[in-house]
Image (cartoon, rainbow, N blue to C red):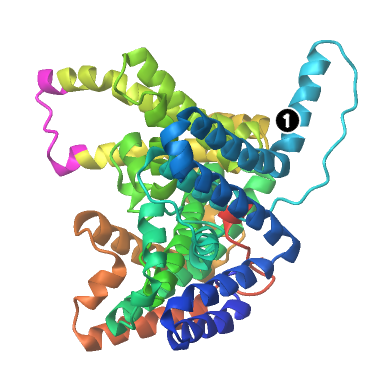
Amino acid sequence: MLFNSIHFLWFFPVAVLGFYLIHPKRIRYIWLLACSYYFYMAWNPRYALLMLASTAITYLGSLLIGGRTLSRAKPALRKVTLAIVIAANLAILVYFKYSNFLLDEMGELLSLAGVSMVLPTVDVILPVGISFYTFQALSYSIDVYRGEVQVERNFLKYALFVSFFPQLVAGPIERTSHLLSQIRTIERRKIDPKGMYHGLLLMLWGLFLKMVIADRIVVIVDTVFDRYYTYGGTALILAALAFAIQIYCDFSSYSTIAIGAAEVLGFSLMENFAAPYLAGSIKEFWSRWHISLSTWFRDYLYIPLGGSRCSKLRHYRNLMITFLVSGLWHGASLNFIVWGGIHGVLQIAENALAPVVSKINARLSVKTDCFSYKAARVVKTFVLVDLAWIFFRAPGLAVAVDYIRRIVLDFDPWALSQEVIYTLGLNRREVGVLFMALLVLFIADGLRYFKKQSIADALLNQNIPFQYICVTLLVLSIFIFGAYGPAFDAQAFIYFQF
């Protein structure tokens, strides 16, 4: 069920009303569980069984891991049980997400070895959000094993933790200690008018990001990337910039709506984006981009590998493994693995060159605390991130390399004077709307970066008339300038495919 659909427009009020009206309050979790499974089954009812299977495996395994018998008498069996739980969940994930990729790569290896063999393909549809709820369920089992959380014996409450509909299919990936603890005290969720208003503001802002910016700028992205070989370097650069904006607005819009929807229900979800394109380094970028996933990999992969508390070579190895796995998590393609590898190399380079850069700055008396230096670092980081995004968006590795090659060899800055922007799928009116919307986005990200406030927080600090004016303008912009109909080919959220 899409957040920007008529289906969700009536579903959400019903879910909220039912949640606050149902009595006794201690059974609210049953209502929310039913709503969450309905939300997921609106896409494909059969695949809800997969989510149920993942839930049951992690629930039963964690009961054994957290039970007194294994905890005290048989610690080795706890490790075996955890390994089985992880393997079973990853096996489901690999089958549905990576089976054809692995078969294709196996065929390539056999071909290189001189073996001619036609391997079968697996006819499966990738279940929406499988990577998200699998990781969330696994984090619970690992936390129980580590003794960081108590095992949940109520299966339905745990099932709600895995399937909580606001963040089910595209995050944020919640932690047990944060979300499950709120579910355990669900009867304490009270109607908070200010919190509900704040949540609705976030939902409204998310819809603006999705429908006014992301679903509009995707026209430029698809127009150029689908026939990149017919465009000059300037158009290719504009399309790469457009994709950076598209994926940010598309993904952050889902997280923002999810956080807002949860807040209306009295729940708190973790922040997932914090003005990432204003980061001054790759490391800072990853502390601001998809925070729930980057911290998941940090806590459950990077640190267990040894983190940074080891030799430099092992530290760099740990970084590369983490980023390569992160790339593979995003999709069954060499593109994503290379994209992750690029970020790993860039972060290693930053780390290794930091002492050299510090010495050069000191030798040249460079002022590192001034605006110009900080702005230069932001621009540098954004350019590197945007180059990596080309590998993420291109349909193949060869296309990504050729795309970058054409930017260099066919660079034609004079095309800007020929108003090339109006030849990429959007007319003058639509480009004007897009630039105005991007200005609003820039202001919002500036507030988040410099004032540590979301746009909803900033509005709540203003006088009531100003709030009403801004809310009215947001609503009107969504209805008037939102991307509707076949001309824009409005799409589902990008991260549904992951």
Vertical position of residue 388 compared to residue 6: above or below: above
Other-residue count near label 1 (Cα within 10 Å), few / some / many at <14 / 14–19 / ≥20: some
Examine the rendering and report whether any part of residue 302 can be seen: yes
| SS type, badge 1 | helix
Depth check, front residue: 140 or 286:
140
Q: Which amino acid does label 1 sit on?
A: Leu
**Residue depicted at x 65% and y 53%:** 223
The magenta stretch spans residue 73 = no
Examine the rendering and report whether any part of residue 297 can be seen: no
Q: Mark 1 = which residue?
A: 102
**Residue depicted at x 83% and y 17%:** 111
Q: Position of residue 128 (x, y in %)?
A: 64, 56
Range shown magenta: 361-373
Examine the image and state in which quarter residue 92 appears. Answer: top right
111 sits to left or right of 137: right
**Residue depicted at x 67% and y 69%:** 487
Q: Where is residue 182 in the image (x, y as percent from the top left)?
A: 37, 65
> How many marks are shown on the rendered structure?
1
**Residue depicted at x 76% and y 51%:** 125
Vertical position of residue 218 compared to residue 460: above or below: above
Quarter of the figure with the N terminus: bottom right
Depth check, front residue: 476 or 468:
468
Q: Where is residue 100 in the image (x, y as percent from the top left)?
A: 76, 36
